[in-house]
């Protein structure tokens, strides 16, 4: 199959992204790491993080090998005509893990350098932290596009000929999206359990019971807490958004292959369009990264504005570039599709701003939670839960509007929803998700910046740097809390659009599975036709996918339940691990004389070991459950049940994820506001109440909430890969 010359922009963009990531990494490494004490602390964190990641990858490797063997057996038993599925699955997981590894390696080297740069100025600290976070963002998009371009190039040689070639290629590539999703879920759940077990243990015993500051070197759990920031919020988030990025591009390409299957050359253009938009987004992300800077004495709003300049300029430029890309590509209805992309970009901006409003202590919702601390921890928790619930309104409405606009723009506002309009509209929803994630290079940089700034603050505290330095790192840390919350909202929003595109891809995969078995069906006109000739409405009618079918309703209930079950399991996992951490910290305070006086060194290693063991043990069951549920539902309830499952999981999971992420972020920043001297300041009654709220919110925002967006997409990916099994048994 001859690839158009413009396709080569995709691998070029991937190499540029990786090259710039390496440049930022080398620039960071040339900066001074600070005093011997700062280097020592950074070494502890780096060693603990790498040790954890090594253990996690051992466990995940075993799971991946077992799943790949199962796929290979199924390919033989079910007569799959595509032998590449197990290999695509493995490469997706490998690159997802690699992205997390590189990001975490950078973060563990950057924290002490950020703290040391903050001794000079706030701007110097911001630049090192942000550009180190950019290594994560650019590595994710670089590896993602490299993986996509490599598979597309290779499979174009294997499959060629009629219009089914591109459909086969794109559905095969969706399999490596499942590999990325599986790796991401393990990384998110394992990292989230690790970091929050340490964080909760450090807060309960250190800050509440012993009344010592956060990141105090006398606290045995403080190193494990700093390690956790890296394995959860850097490695976990990197793997998470890698699979979102790839999933949106792959699902849109698959939808393009089917929507334009009868359009000849237009089919290839529809397939490579999302790749090209993502490729141009790489260059614009790099441009935006260089726009981020601030001044000494900047307020929280000034710092937020500094980051907003980079991200918003990149978003505006990619919006304009989309019109040019689709016009020059000559794709059908290029103008409408361009507006679909803009609807996705706008949704991302609105969700980010809404998240900032509900989680930053510059605004009333979080300020009210801080004020609630004057009457105790119960009112802090009640106010935080209420704020989190209210905060779901804007993101849900925004995603709903974006779905409708992107659908209608792409199908030429065909209100009759003909078969052709439906296919083109779903393609528009997919390309809207691509638009939202097109500048991921910089948007992920703002998220990965957070744990780097947090660790920098911890290093400054433990190294006993001056009050002015600590004030600067506190400002960077508070900004990081907000950007992390914004990043989680962005990731959840993109997951909703991507999951909807994947749901449409599932129908196409069912169609291919039926073609392979020679199954025929009756269309809307009552005619018996081959699966290849059926439209999406034909399939929906054939499988009775409607709200009166109890299979669909039961599937929807199971999907909504799965989100709550998953959150419950991960919350309990954090609770069990945190209990062990609390007991260990109390034991050390009790048995190692002189810790609280600063005359003895705590046993940091034992706390790191507790978090590592707990994370490895506790992450297995929730992660495997996400893989098992779609398979079981497919075998018992068939195609209609799976579609209900995916819809229920998407609606319930998206809303629950926004609630948990925003409530947790608001509790965290409410505590930060009190620590800045408001409502009594550090050590006050309100401070202790907000610490309890922050501790409750820790697994909300860093374990269960952000893992849900992966759960939503992984269930879709598993359903797609297992479509052949569902058809065979139902």
Image (spheres, rainbow, N blue to C red):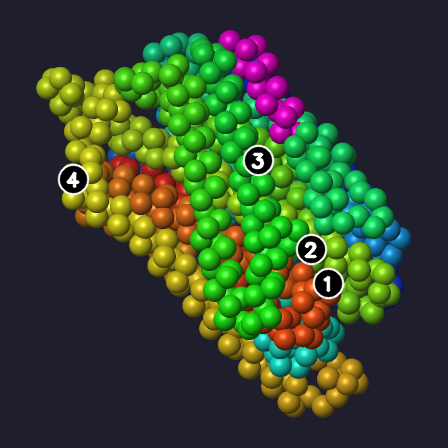
Q: Nearer the viewer, mark 4 or mark 1?
A: 1
Residue matched to label 1: 676
Q: CA distance from mark 2 to mark 4?
A: 50 Å
CB-based contact (under 8 Å), mark 4 and mark 3? no
Q: Nearer the viewer, mark 4 or mark 3?
A: 3
Residue at 20% across, 24% down: 538
Q: Looking at the image, is mark 3 or mark 1 earlier in the sequence?
A: 3
Q: Is residue 693 left or right of residue 72?
A: right
Mark yes or no: residue 608 visible. no
Residue matched to label 3: 349
Q: Looking at the image, is mark 1 or mark 2 earlier in the sequence?
A: 2
Q: Looking at the image, is mark 4 or mark 3 earlier in the sequence?
A: 3
CB-based contact (under 8 Å), mark 1 and mark 2? yes
Q: Secondary structure at mark 2?
A: helix
Which percent across, then down, holds residue 702? 54, 57
Q: CA distance from mark 4 to mark 1?
A: 56 Å
Which percent across, then down, holds residue 418? 27, 17
Q: Quadrant of residue 259?
A: top left
Q: Nearer the viewer, mark 2 or mark 4?
A: 2
């Amino acid at each position: 199959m001859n690839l158009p010359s413009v396709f080569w922009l995709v691998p070029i963009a991937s190499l540029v992204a990786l090259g710039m990531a390496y440049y930022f990494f080398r620039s960071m490494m040339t900066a001074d790491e600070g005093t011997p004490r700062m280097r020592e602390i950074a070494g502890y964190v780096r060693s603990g993080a790498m040790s954890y990641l090594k253990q996690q990858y051992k466990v995940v490797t075993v799971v991946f090998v077992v799943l790949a063997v199962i796929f290979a057996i199924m390919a033989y038993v079910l007569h799959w005509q595509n032998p590449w599925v197990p290999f695509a699955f493995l490469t997706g997981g490998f690159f997802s893990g690699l992205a997390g590894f590189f990001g975490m390696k950078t973060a563990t080297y950057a924290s002490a350098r950020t703290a040391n740069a903050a001794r000079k100025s706030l701007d110097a600290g911001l630049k090192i932290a942000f550009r180190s976070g950019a290594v994560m963002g650019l590595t994710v998009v670089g590896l993602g596009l490299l993986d996509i371009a490599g598979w597309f190039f290779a499979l174009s040689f294997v499959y060629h000929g009629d219009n089914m070639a591109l459909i086969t290629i794109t559905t095969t590539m969706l399999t490596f999206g499942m590999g990325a999703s599986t790796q991401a879920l393990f990384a998110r759940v394992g990292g989230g359990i690790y970091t929050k077990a340490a964080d909760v243990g450090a807060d309960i015993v250190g800050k509440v019971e012993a009344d010592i500051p956060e990141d105090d070197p006398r606290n045995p759990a403080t190193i494990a807490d700093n390690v956790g920031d890296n394995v959860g919020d850097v490695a976990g988030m990197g793997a998470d958004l890698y699979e979102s990025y790839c999933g949106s591009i792959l699902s849109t390409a698959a939808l393009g292959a089917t929507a334009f299957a009868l359009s000849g050359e237009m089919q290839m253009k529809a397939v490579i369009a999302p790749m090209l938009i993502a490729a141009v987004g790489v260059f614009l992300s790099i441009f935006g990264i260089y726009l981020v800077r601030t001044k000494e004495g900047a307020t929280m709003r000034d710092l937020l504005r500094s980051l907003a300049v980079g991200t918003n300029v990149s978003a505006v430029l990619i919006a304009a570039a989309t019109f040019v890309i689709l016009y020059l590509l000559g794709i059908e209805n290029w103008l409408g599709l361009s507006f679909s992309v803009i609807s996705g970009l706008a949704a991302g901006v609105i969700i980010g701003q809404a998240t900032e409003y509900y989680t930053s202590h510059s605004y009333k919702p979080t300020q009210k939670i801080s004020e609630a601390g004057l009457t105790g921890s119960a009112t802090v928790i009640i106010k935080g839960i209420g704020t989190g619930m209210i905060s779901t309104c804007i993101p849900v409405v925004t995603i709903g509007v974006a779905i409708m606009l992107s659908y209608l723009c792409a199908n030429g506002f065909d209100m009759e929803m003909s078969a052709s309009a439906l296919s083109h509209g779903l393609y528009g929803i997919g390309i809207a998700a691509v638009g939202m994630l097109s500048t991921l290079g910089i948007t992920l940089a703002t998220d990965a910046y957070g744990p780097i700034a947090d660790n920098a603050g911890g290093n400054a505290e433990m190294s006993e740097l001056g009050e002015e330095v600590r004030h600067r790192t506190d400002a960077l840390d508070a900004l990081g809390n907000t950007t992390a919350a914004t990043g989680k909202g962005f990731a959840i929003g993109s997951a909703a659009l991507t999951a909807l595109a994947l749901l449409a891809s599932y129908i196409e995969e069912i169609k291919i599975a039926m073609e392979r078995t020679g199954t025929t069906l009756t269309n809307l006109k009552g005619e018996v036709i081959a699966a290849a000739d059926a439209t999406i409405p034909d399939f929906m009618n054939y499988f009775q996918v409607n709200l009166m079918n109890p299979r669909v309703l039961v599937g929807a209930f199971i999907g909504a339940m799965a989100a709550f079950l998953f959150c419950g399991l991960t919350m309990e996992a954090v609770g069990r691990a945190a209990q062990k951490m609390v007991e260990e910290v109390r034991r050390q305070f009790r048995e190692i004389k002189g810790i609280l006086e600063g005359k003895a060194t705590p046993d940091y290693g034992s706390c790191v070991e507790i978090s590592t063991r707990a994370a490895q043990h506790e992450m297995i069951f929730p992660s495997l459950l996400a893989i098992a549920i779609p398979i079981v539902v497919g075998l018992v309830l068939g195609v209609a049940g799976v579609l209900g499952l995916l819809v229920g999981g998407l609606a319930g999971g998206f809303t629950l994820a926004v609630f948990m992420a925003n409530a947790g972020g608001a509790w965290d920043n409410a505590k930060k506001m009190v620590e800045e001297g408001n409502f009594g300041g550090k050590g006050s009654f309100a401070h202790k109440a907000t610490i309890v709220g922050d501790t409750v919110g820790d697994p909300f925002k860093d374990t269960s909430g952000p893992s849900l967006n992966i759960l939503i997409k992984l269930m879709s990916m598993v359903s797609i890969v297992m479509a052949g099994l569902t058809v065979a048994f139902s």
